[in-house]
């Protein structure tokens, strides 16, 4: 993340420099997403899911998601994709990037029917991105950090004290990040269950949407330790339940069969096996 404008500039100059960066547009996208989700949430809890405002804010939220991930992918594409590279290699490089995966799935949600649960993972991500950008860029721009007591500008490595608000935001991000990413993983799994239940009713386009989301979730499973941990925790809970003596043997056998099928499916769809294992997961930035 780029540093804030130098404190030697005036407040107006610092704000102008901050607002003219692509990163500020990225921040505005996440902030708009949060406002849209908040407004959509008000419509949802009052059972006005398909009111004009609800539909507008739902689409605006995913439009904001597309914009933010598009910015990150654009910057990463310029830095990582080499001129003259093979199309296949370029495609694999991009599709193995988490930000590209979220860009594509946000486009799917933007044009698909409303699935309110799909908003929640993006909301959690945006909370942390807005908080981090506020701490590292907005607060230092509005209130440049002051030199620590007893230090001089000429002191090598002189530390500067941040504002109490910036320190509080930093503690919040550090304390709740892992738990929130695990929450995102669980939400993404529950969203698959929600889509599967919808597909059983054969609603229009439900099986196509389920298939697309399954591909996305499989890609996330191969890269995210939180997704893997969430699946492992859910499987352990089911294992514990089916070991109950009151559970019929047929149910236990069915669960073991399902686990074997899922393991075989994961192994069969492991693209690294076919690509020589050369792909490494990319750190999510958006």
Image: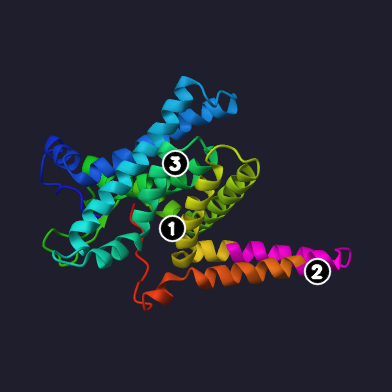
* Between marks 3 and 1 in the image, the one whose residue lies nearer the viewer: 3
> Who comes first in sequence, dot 2 or dot 3?
3
Mark 1 neighbour density, 10 Å: few (under 14) some (14–19) many (20 or more): few
> Who comes first in sequence, dot 1 or dot 2?
1
Q: CA distance from mark 1 to mark 2?
A: 38 Å
Whether 28 is drawn above or below 231: the answer is: above
Give the x, y percent position of residue 187: 55, 50
Whether 263 is drawn above or below 160: the answer is: below
Quarter that holds the N terminus: bottom left
Circles 1, 2 touching at the beta carbon (< 8 Å) = no
Which residue corresponds to mark 1? 174
Q: Secondary structure at mark 3?
A: helix
276 inside magenta stretch:
no
238 inside magenta stretch:
yes
Q: CA distance from mark 2 to mark 3?
A: 39 Å
Circles 2, 3 touching at the beta carbon (< 8 Å) = no
Give the x, y percent position of residue 155: 14, 65
Q: Residue at x 34, y 51 (%)?
A: 286
Protein image colouring:
rainbow
> Who comes first in sequence, dot 3 or dot 1?
3
Mark 3 neighbour density, 10 Å: few (under 14) some (14–19) many (20 or more): many
Circles 3, 1 touching at the beta carbon (< 8 Å) = no
* Magenta extent: 231-253
Which residue corresponds to mark 2? 243
Whether 118 is drawn above or below 159: the answer is: above
Give the x, y percent position of residue 52: 46, 20
Q: Residue at x 47, y 32 (%)?
A: 38
Q: Disc number at residue 202?
A: none
> Who is closer to the viewer here, 246 or 259?
259
Q: Is residue 174 left or right of residue 81?
A: right
Which residue corresponds to mark 3? 109
């Amino acid at each position: 993340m780029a540093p804030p404008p130098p404190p030697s500039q005036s407040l107006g100059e610092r704000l102008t420099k901050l607002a003219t960066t692509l990163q500020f547009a990225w921040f505005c996208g996440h902030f708009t997403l949060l406002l849209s989700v908040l407004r959509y949430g008000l419509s949802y809890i009052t059972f006005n899911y398909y009111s004009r405002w609800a539909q507008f804010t739902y689409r605006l939220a995913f439009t904001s998601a597309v914009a933010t991930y598009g910015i990150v992918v654009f910057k990463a594409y310029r830095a990582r994709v080499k001129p003259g590279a093979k199309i296949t290699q370029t495609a694999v490089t991009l599709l193995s990037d988490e930000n590209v995966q979220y860009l594509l799935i946000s486009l799917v949600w933007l044009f698909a029917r409303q699935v309110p649960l799909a908003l929640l993972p993006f909301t959690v991500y945006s909370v942390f991105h807005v908080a981090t950008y506020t701490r590292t860029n907005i607060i230092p721009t509005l209130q440049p950090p002051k030199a620590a007591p007893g230090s001089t500008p000429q002191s090598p490595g002189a530390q500067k004290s941040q504002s109490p608000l910036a320190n509080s935001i930093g503690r919040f991000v550090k304390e709740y990040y892992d738990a929130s990413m695990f929450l995102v993983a669980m939400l993404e799994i529950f969203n698959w269950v929600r889509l599967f239940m919808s597909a059983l009713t054969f609603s229009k386009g439900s099986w196509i949407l389920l298939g697309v989301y399954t591909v996305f979730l499989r890609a996330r499973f191969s890269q995210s330790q939180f997704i893997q941990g969430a699946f492992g925790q859910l499987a352990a809970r089911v294992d514990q339940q089916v070991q109950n003596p009151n559970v019929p043997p047929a149910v236990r056998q069915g669960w073991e069969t399902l686990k074997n099928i899922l393991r075989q499916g994961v192994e069969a769809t492991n693209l690294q096996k076919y690509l020589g294992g050369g792909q490494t997961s990319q750190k999510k930035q958006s």
